[in-house]
Amino acid sequence: MTADALHGEGIALWRSGRLDDALDRLGRAVDLVPTEPAYRNSFALVLAARGQDAAAASAWRAALALDPALPALWSNLGESRKNTAATAAVAYGRALAADPHTAATANNLANLRLAAGQTAAAVE
């Protein structure tokens, strides 16, 4: 099976709630093409869905090492529950620098700033 096919199957399994099977397929896709950041991103999303936050953050960092310009990777890393507020803010900022039109990321950063009492920065 090709890496693309494994990735597609892994996504379908993830969406159907079969996280263990999804992780298997996505891990195999990463093994076949370790230089594809999209495969690592999907793998990290499933790890996060399983509550394996440290492993998910590590997988996002590995994907970012391959392509630090992908805003989705920064945004997903920002959402990791293993982050401090400062780390999440940096990740969201990098995502928005790469794609300033991502409303969900802007909203996440604004909420983070509101929680920190930074109302003016949140409105910005």
Image (spheres, helix red, strand yellow):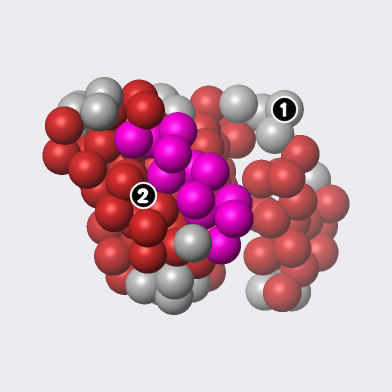
Q: How many marks?
A: 2
The quadrant of the rendering that contains the C terminus is top right
Start and end of the magenta stretch? 6-17
Q: Regarding mark 2 in the picture, which secondary structure is present there?
A: helix
Q: Is residue 14 magenta?
A: yes
Report which residue position mark 1 lands on: 101
Q: Residue at x 49, y 62 (%)?
A: 18
Q: Is residue 25 magenta?
A: no
Q: Nearer the viewer, residue 81 or 106?
A: 81
Tell me if I can see residue 80 in this picture: no
Nearer to me, 36 or 100: 36
Label 1, secondary structure: give it. loop
Amino acid bearing label 2: Phe
State the residue at coordinates (29%, 54%): 24
In which quadrant of the rendered image does the N terminus lie? Answer: top left
Separation (CA) of disc 1 from disc 2: 25 Å
Q: Which mark is residue 115?
A: none
Residue 103 image-quadrant placement = top right
Picture residue at 31% right of the left edge, 70% below the top: 54
Q: Which residue is mark 2?
A: 43
Lower sequence index among marks 1 and 2: 2
> What secondary structure is the stretch in magenta mostly built from?
helix
Label 2: how many residues lie within 10 Å, few (<14), some (14-19) or many (20+)? many
